[in-house]
Image: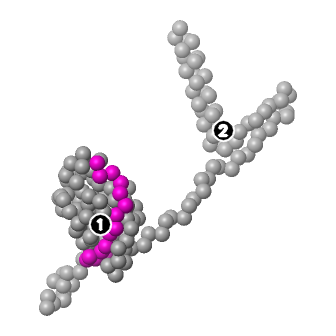
Amino acid sequence: MYIRKSILVLILLLNVVLFSYVALENRVIFARTIDEEAAFSLELEPHRPAIAPPPVIEPLPDDGAWQKFEATAYSVFGITKSGVWVRRGIIAVDPRVVPLGSIVEIQGEGCSGIYTAMDTGPEIQGREVDIYMPTGQEAIRFGRRDVRLKLIRHGWDPASPFEDPLMTGGSTR
């Protein structure tokens, strides 16, 4: 019994190794004739998915015009990307569109108000905004909605160095 299991395991391992070798070499053996001399194979190009160009992300204009956004809601406990505790009035944004620290006005069903962009999220891409809600039930009920967003005050760019006049030797006047 032990010998049969060992042989079965050995055969399975050999199949895995051979299959891996064929897959790595990007070759598929289609047929083999009865005489061993007439074997042939087909070389395959590795599968390369079509690469779409990345979407163009345009920052929110400073002119105070209303822009169309898609809003969702989230409910978490903790610290935002900018280092403050989550609370009502906080939104998560794509910082390439709405810089962190920006104050915006949102108009939409059940969410109209003034918000501060203090958080980000991996799913927030482009013209999307995630509105903080204290409970998960509220966030689920909110769902996904079309809203209008207007920039009231432009935030900061966390990638740029902080310019403190005391640190750079400048005056405070």
Callout 2 environment at 10 Å: few (<14), some (14 to 19), or many (20+)? Answer: few
Residue 22: which disc? 2
> Can you give x and y, in whole percent of width and height, for residue 81 in the image?
26, 61
Kind of residue at badge 1: Gln
Q: Is residue 66 visible?
A: yes
Image point 63% across, 34% down: which residue? Answer: 19
Residue 70: assigned label? none
Compared across the picture, whether 57 is left or right of 23 comes to left
The CA span between labels 2 and 1 is 58 Å
> Which residues are drawn in magenta?
141-160
Q: Secondary structure at mark 2?
A: helix
Against 101, residue 38 (above or below) is above
Q: Camera-side residue: 136 or 18?
A: 136
Question: For the point 29% across and 54% down, which residue is it?
Answer: 73
Quadrant of the image containing the C terminus: bottom left
Q: Secondary structure at mark 1?
A: strand
Residue 63 percent across, percent down from the top left:
34, 81
Corner quadrant of residue 15: top right
Amino acid bearing label 2: Val
